[in-house]
Image (spheres, rainbow, N blue to C red):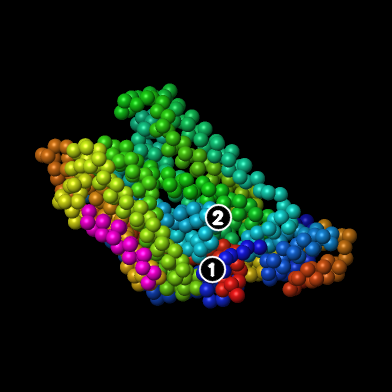
Amino acid sequence: MQVTSSVRQPLVTGGKTYHDVTHDVSRQVEGKPSKLWYMAFLTAASVLALGSIALLTTLWEGIGIWGLNKTVGWAWDITNFVWWVGIGHAGTLISAVLLLFRQKWRTSINRAAEAMTIFAVICAAMFPVIHMGRPWVGAYWALPLPNTYGSLWVNFNSPLLWDVFAISTYFSVSLVFWYIGLIPDFATIRDRATGLRRKIYGALSFGWDGAAKTWMRYESVSLILAGLATPLVLSVHTIVSFDFATSVIPGWHTTIFPPYFVAGAIFSGFAMVLTLMIITRKVYKLEDYITIGHIELMNIVIIITGSIVGIAYITEFFIAWYSGVDAEQYAFINRATGPYWWAYWSMMTCNVISPQLFWIKKIRTSIVATFLLSLVVNIGMWFERFVIIVTSLHRDYLPSSWAMFYPSWADVGVYLFTFGVFFTFFFLFAKFFPVINMAEVKSVLKSTSEKAHK
Amino acid sequence: MERDTHFILGVYVDENVLLHAVEKVRGSGVKIHEVYSPYPVHGLEHALGYKRSKLPIAAFLFGMLGTSLALTMQFYMMKFDWPMIIGGKNYAAFPDFVPVSFEMTVLLAAFGMVGVFLITSNLKPWAQPRIFDVRSTDDKHIMAIDLANNTSLKEDKIKSILTSSGATEVNRKSFE
């Protein structure tokens, strides 16, 4: 029997019974989608179609149509890559790290957050693939294939190759973790359905019957997957930061990058989870499951990780000064006062100053304020990557090579394309999959409902 | 199935009643076929006397396999098959091989363990489960008792044991 302290807020409000949980979540899958859903889906699909023009042009013409030049050889593509990967991290944090810490409030949000992880990682992975110019031969460069396939073995000393392994492992393990959690809920939908839907969800549920022995194994699998996913998620953004940290570019050659990138990833990921969950709970009327309490807890994570990121920004400056290396000092002064000062100060305002508003209880329990600040954080985190990447490159070692980076329409278009992919996938998920993990919510319902507190 | 099978089903609403009921029913000498629940009930596996799952061992072994494969692959390619000087590093630059080895460990441990889980639990897209009561994936716990395994007890006796243990309904279900 589980006992929860009476000082804790109930996780599910509205006096829901087990059957209510089943009904409230399954009806989204069973019913016809609302007008609002069609509008949202069509908007996302249009963005996808529009962005695919830029993507196809890039593939046809080559990446020469991007805004890159000989000084700034990496800009929007890698910025977007890091941004999307970072967003993905919140899903794994919620499903794996909070499981290990036995935070029961994760049960209402883990399903959608994990879905977000998977779609964000798909979007992220597109950029390294597209930027190869000829993605169809990319397998020869990225996978350890024998020399007879045209090139030498891949270089295991390169952080870019570590990324190939890290991102693909992260994607596939997250997908498996997510799917294992979906199996019992697909079975619930199967048992409510008839006809074709019963057949489809029957196949998706892998013949789940809820036997005690299977549940025992399921719990064991979840716990170990969480134990594996926790170091995995930390390693992924660490390796992403190695793309920069193992180089010798002033502004990138920094040992603080791994923890700083991981904190930033969780920070931006929680912001995206909030953006999506605030919309989902409203559209699907799930206010009793994703309560203000959940939003407040996520906002607290945002204050903590936002403050870690803020300290990291300041530490970088201190270390640049303390190192006594002129190039390093110049790189940082140039960030704050050079031609990209506006990007730097957008980053500082959005990431360091605005999340501090969440110290005020009224703001962190306000849905409107949380929604707006979640957008601000996502903008800020995009600028963070842009600042790190572009300002470190645009002042080359030779002043004659100094240059500015201006995005072309194709840069913007490919970024839009990934937004289209992300939201199209998310809306399809929200329609056809149970957006809340019913089985896990039921398992905490009794010990944490309002009734249990009486 | 070759022969007809007949089950007595006890329907339980509350998980705590269920836990005591399982002990009581087993204590009266009735062999429980299985209990079906909409969510994991903690302590149920102990009450039913199930042994701890060996899946962690599978995960560990697959993880070790991943580490060894990754290290073998990297040392073979970089040191023996086609040695090249990259950035003045050793051919066998062990620290550089750590990230890929770690990722392969996690990948194989996760996939291996999940594979074993799916196989041992007979979970596959074309599986046709025996569904005793559709409410077992909604809000009820269903205790199934196979009459063929409890020939020493009369059917009515089993039914009364279930009712007295707190079952809200007692049903009979047969499969062909």
Residue at 14% across, 45% down: A403
Q: Position of residue B121 (x, y in %)?
A: 65, 52
Residue at 53% across, 61% down: A104
Question: At label 2, which amino acid type do we have?
Answer: Ile
- Circles 1 and 2: CB atoms closer than 8 Å: no
Q: Residue furthest left?
A: A400
Q: Main secondary structure of the magenta part?
A: helix
A97 or A362, nearer to the observer: A362
Say whether mark 2 and mark 1 are on the same chain: yes
Please give the chain letter of the residue carrying mark 1: A
Q: Position of residue A97 (x, y in %)?
A: 49, 53
Mark 2 sits on what residue?
A180
Q: Quadrant of the C terminus of chain A?
A: bottom right
- Label 2 sits on a secondary structure element that is helix
Please check the rendered image and state whether residue A241 is part of the magenta-colored stretch, yes or no: no
- Label 1 sits on a secondary structure element that is loop
A330 or A149, nearer to the observer: A330
Asked if residue A12 is positioned above or below residue B119 in the image, the reply reads below
Kindly identify which numbered label has been placed on residue A7: 1
Tell me the distance, in whole angstroms, between the alpha carbons under discs 1 and 2: 33 Å
Residue B162 seen anywhere in this rendered image of the structure: yes
Residue at 35% across, 31% down: A151
Q: Quadrant of the N terminus of chain A?
A: bottom right
**Residue A439 horizontal side relative to residue A388, left or right:** right
Please check the rendered image and state whether residue A347 is part of the magenta-colored stretch, yes or no: yes
Q: Nearer the viewer, mark 1 or mark 2?
A: 1
Q: Position of residue A139 (x, y in %)?
A: 38, 40
What count of labels does the image hold? Answer: 2
Asked if residue A146 is positioned above or below residue A438 in the image, the reply reads above
Q: Quadrant of residue A216?
A: bottom right
Region rendered in magenta: A344-362
**Residue A139 horizontal side relative to residue A433, left or right:** left
